[in-house]
Amino acid sequence: MATHPAPDVWEVQGRQIDLPVKIESASFAGALWRPSRTAVDAQLEQYGLRSAGFRDGGLALLMLVVYREFVLGTYDEVGLAVLASGPGGPGMFTLELPVTQGFTREAGREIWGLPKWLMTSRAHVGGARSTLSMSDGDVAVMDATIQTGHRPLPIPVPLITPTLARAEDGPHAGRLLRGKALMRGHRVRIGRGRGTTFGWGEHPMADRARALGMDRPPFATISAERLTGSLGESRAVDG
């Protein structure tokens, strides 16, 4: 189990992690959907939360990230999140966060309460056309192609995201944690979902995605050839 010997200092598997962790080199692609708030509520009920959104529409995000030169390692990550209403305001609540390395799995679960689990993947992420194929052991979970516009924006784009997570285990077990991801996208491309496809397998994460309408075309896509930023401490906001 991770230890917390000092404020903003954690130790995981004998390695010290100082917060905030700096992200210097990653690539990102994502797609956005507008599921009904009823569909989002069904996914959030077990965590004691409800959907946030506009009128009857919620918000769901699928993101693909390839991390390089990072204190938590070099790995791929796939996130499934929805916009939730929580103490202190809305935030993106992470439902699933599979990764390809064991160290970041433990650090993510223990420090930030994130639902990380181990997957295998083949990824090319960050340009006008990003692709990823992921499996859980021998079970295929997803094959994705995310298409954006071909011309990148001329300036970096800030991507500041309030986050929520319900810790399943570790020091924060059972508690709702609020944090903030302070990111900046470089050579960002935006699209309208044309040419974007998701093939979902027979897996609990795939079932969640289908329940949120992620087997239909997204309304928007985004990619960043380079993603930089920081992730600080997540604080308990209940219990």
Image (spheres, rainbow, N blue to C red):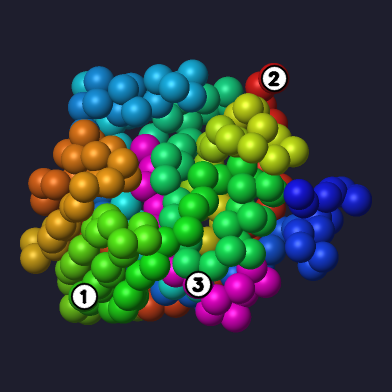
Quadrant, the C terminus: top right
In the displayed structure image, the side of residue 65 where residue 230 appears, left or right = right
In the displayed structure image, the side of residue 104 where residue 80 appears, left or right = left
Query: Residue 88, image x and y in percent?
Result: 59, 26
Instruction: Tell me which label, 3 or 1, sits earlier in the chain.
Output: 3
Could you say which quadrant of the image residue 174 lies in?
A: top right
Q: Which residue carries the number 3 mark?
A: 75
The dot on residue 10 is none
Where disc 2 sits, the SS reads loop
Amino acid at the residue labelled 2:
Gly
Where disc 1 sits, the SS reads strand
Amino acid at the residue labelled 1:
Arg
In three-dimensional space, the C-alpha distance between marks 3 and 1, rounded to whole angstroms, equals 20 Å
Range of the magenta residues? 68-82
Instruction: Tell me which label, 3 or 2, sits earlier in the chain.
Output: 3
Could you say which quadrant of the image residue 146 lies in?
A: bottom left
- From the viewer's perspective, is residue 28 above or below residue 56? below
Q: Which residue appears farthest toward the front when viewing the image?
A: 138
In three-dimensional space, the C-alpha distance between marks 3 and 2, rounded to whole angstroms, equals 33 Å
In the displayed structure image, the side of residue 107 where residue 87 appears, left or right = left
In magenta stretch: residue 74: yes
In three-dimensional space, the C-alpha distance between marks 1 and 2, rounded to whole angstroms, equals 43 Å
Q: Which residue carries the number 2 mark?
A: 239
Query: Residue 169, image x and y in percent?
Result: 64, 37
Q: Which residue is drawn at 46% across and 37% down?
A: 93
User: Crowding at label 2, few (<14), some or many (≥20) Cα neighbours within 10 Å?
Assistant: few
Amino acid at the residue labelled 3:
Tyr
The dot on residue 129 is 1
Q: Which residue is drawn at 13% across and 60% down?
A: 197
